[in-house]
Image: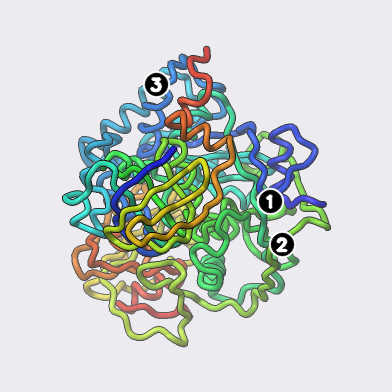
């Protein structure tokens, strides 16, 4: 799978409270959550984001709560992937489970850059800077989950 | 190569003789937990699978604790959805308003977790039950849905950091100070993806209540779980609360640890985590005058009877500072009743505090004590990110119940003496 998009850049420790504040957790509705995505960190995000855009961040992205509403809000806002130096573990598995592509890569990326991510071969290409980085592709088990669009799509459903 | 305590529990739950760090396993779940915020998402996903029943109605528990008693219509709808699903599926351990408490205080009290269990919860502080010698970790709603359907969860086996505790905590210094010190030492991602394995002869001096507090905040270092060895204190607690038999796992002598951190408990000091990150810790040789507007004593971290006891002893016969709102939240109905029996609630009210029914409430900025612009709160809760308890321009300082109570009387952040 390959994705290309324009970057929204954030720093370290972007926590789940700024991704989707608790005052909005009284709904599981994807579009409602998307409308408040990153509100307490970047009030302009929801106005500027377009389908296919990519978030790039520093270390420990998604730290804090287990709220699945966080990757849901990001995915439903139109973001196609998140690249970070490192991810907090619950956010990491939640993103995979809902089919939001994520990449752990310490690449040099700035706000507005155009980047391309090649998930199968583990390559991130910063088109704007004409530089590329390698990353470790997910093990097959996790790639299958993402390719299926999420955890529940990839397991046998309809069990009696 | 030997296994850590965590690795042993994981191996036992996927039918393997041994597992090693980095391996992905499919594990059997002993208990799956959800609350009024995370269960609705899980239920929606579960329903999409077409499953007609849950894998085991005795091994799933829902606790309606975050936005309850319902803070608004949407929260009420989420509770109703969870309630209806629990009834439909015959969920045995469903805790509604009246029976519920803050989930991570309630489950040990109800004896729902024993040593050797594998517990997953759609709440990041599920790591709390590691205090009882269980493997226990926070996950998301889709994981919960999959576990409700299949009774299994995929897990990556974590490497470990060993915390070797010796000596004894000094007077007025508690488990909260220890875990805040650890977070300050290694950072909010210092144990990322790892298990925090506590060990050493200092453990015997730490109460179960303090172990629950310490394990509760393992997630704040990025850890997968925190776990304490099982000793007589653990066994007594489990026997007192549960009819199930614990299974005791011990780390092998030749288990591998990525790091060993030695901590002399007698050197731990009263610690406060400053806004807006839990690793931003300071001790009282370095804390300027900071006036506060609100104090919260409660939460899954520090809402237990021992915590209320410590706070009440400090406030006994005294009054909270003028202009400071002090909110006390016993974590369960049983704790609340016992606190009444002991006269603690009277002490709090006479001091000028307010006492709430069990709820997560203000900890995550839900209800029961939200902060306005520019306000400051010292709290016994577990997170102080931007906007955590209200306005993005408000501040949360994290501390032990002792420091919080002393600060309530002083109107500013002070040490407990």
Instruction: Tell me residue B16's x, y (percent).
Output: 76, 35
Say which of A103 and B371 sits in front: A103
Residues tagged 3 and 1 counted as in contact (Cβ below 8 A): no
Q: What residue sits 36% from the left and 62% below the top?
A: A129
| Residue position for label 2 | B199
Q: Look at the numbered disc 3 and give the secondary structure of its residue.
A: helix
Say whether residue B269 is left or right of residue B327: right
Note whether residue B149 is visible: yes
Q: Residue at x 32, y 32 (%)?
A: B79
Which element type, helix, strand or loop, lies under badge 1?
helix
User: Which residue in the structure is indicated by mark 3?
Assistant: B48
Q: Please name the residue shown 52% across and 61% down the image.
A: B221
Which label belongs to residue B370? none
Q: Which residue is identified by label 1?
A: B234
User: Where is residue B349 drawn, in percent x and y?
Assistant: 32, 61
Answer few, some or many: residues within 10 Å of disc 2's Cα (few below 14, many 20 plus, some between 14 and 19). some
Q: Earlier in the sequence, mark 2 or mark 1?
A: 2
Q: Residues within 10 Å of mark 1 (few under 14, many from 20)?
A: many
Q: What is the C-alpha distance between the residues marked 2 and 1?
A: 14 Å
Please tell me if label 3 and label 1 are on a single chain: yes
Q: Can you give x and y, in whole percent of width and height, for residue B8 in the image?
A: 74, 45
């Amino acid at each position: 799978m390959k994705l290309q998009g324009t970057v929204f850049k954030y720093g370290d420790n972007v926590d789940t409270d700024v991704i989707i504040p608790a005052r909005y957790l009284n709904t599981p509705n994807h579009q409602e959550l998307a409308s408040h995505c990153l509100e307490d960190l970047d009030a302009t995000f929801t106005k500027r984001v377009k389908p296919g855009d990519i978030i790039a961040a520093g270390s420990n992205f998604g730290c804090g709560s287990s709220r699945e509403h966080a990757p849901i809000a990001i995915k439903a806002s139109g973001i196609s992937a998140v690249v970070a130096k490192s991810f907090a573990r619950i956010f990491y598995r939640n993103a995979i489970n809902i089919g939001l592509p994520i990449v752990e890569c310490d690449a040099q990326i700035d706000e507005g850059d155009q980047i391309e991510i090649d998930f199968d071969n583990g390559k991130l290409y910063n088109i704007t800077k004409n530089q590329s980085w390698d990353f470790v592709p997910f093990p097959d088990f996790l790639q299958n989950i993402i390719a299926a669009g999420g955890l529940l799509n990839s397991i046998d459903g309809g069990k009696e | 190569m030997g296994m850590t305590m965590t690795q042993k529990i994981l191996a036992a739950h996927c039918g393997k003789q041994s597992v090693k760090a980095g391996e992905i396993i499919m594990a059997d779940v002993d208990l799956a937990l959800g609350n009024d915020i995370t269960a609705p998402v899980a239920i929606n996903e579960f329903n999409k699978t077409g499953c007609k029943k849950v894998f085991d109605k005795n091994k799933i528990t829902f606790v309606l604790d975050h936005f309850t008693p319902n803070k608004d219509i949407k929260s009420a709808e989420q509770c109703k959805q969870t309630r209806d699903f629990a009834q439909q599926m015959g969920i045995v351990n469903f805790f509604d308003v009246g029976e519920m408490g803050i989930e991570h205080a309630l489950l040990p009290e109800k004896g729902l977790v024993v040593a050797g269990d594998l517990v997953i919860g759609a709440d990041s502080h599920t790591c709390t039950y590691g205090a009882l010698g269980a493997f226990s970790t926070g996950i998301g709603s889709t994981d919960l849905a999959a576990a409700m359907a299949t009774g299994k969860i995929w897990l990556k086996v974590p490497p470990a950091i060993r915390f070797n505790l010796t000596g004894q905590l000094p007077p007025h210094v508690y488990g909260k100070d220890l875990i805040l010190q650890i977070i300050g030492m290694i950072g909010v991602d210092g144990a990322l993806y790892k298990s925090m394995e506590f060990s050493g002869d200092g453990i015997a001096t730490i109460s179960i209540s303090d172990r629950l507090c310490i394990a509760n905040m393992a997630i704040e270092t990025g850890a997968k779980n925190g776990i304490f060895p099982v000793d007589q204190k653990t066994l007594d607690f489990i026997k007192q609360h549960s009819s199930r038999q614990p299974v005791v796992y011990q780390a092998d002598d030749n288990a591998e640890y990525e790091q060993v951190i030695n901590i002399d408990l007698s050197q731990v000091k009263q610690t406060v985590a400053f806004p807006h990150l839990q690793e931003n810790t300071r001790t009282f040789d370095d804390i300027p005058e900071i006036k506060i507007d609100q104090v919260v004593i409660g939460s899954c971290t520090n809402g237990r009877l021992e915590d209320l006891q410590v706070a009440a002893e400090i406030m006994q016969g005294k009054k909270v500072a003028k202009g400071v709102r002090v909110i006390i939240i016993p974590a369960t109905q049983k704790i609340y009743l016992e606190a009444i029996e002991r006269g603690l609630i009277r002490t709090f009210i006479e001091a000028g505090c307010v006492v709430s029914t069990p709820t997560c409430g203000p900890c995550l900025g839900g209800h029961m004590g939200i902060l306005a612009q520019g306000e400051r709160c010292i709290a016994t809760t577990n997170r102080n990110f931007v906007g955590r308890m209200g306005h993005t321009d408000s501040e949360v300082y994290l501390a032990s119940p002792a420091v919080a109570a002393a600060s309530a009387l002083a109107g500013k952040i002070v040490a407990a003496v």
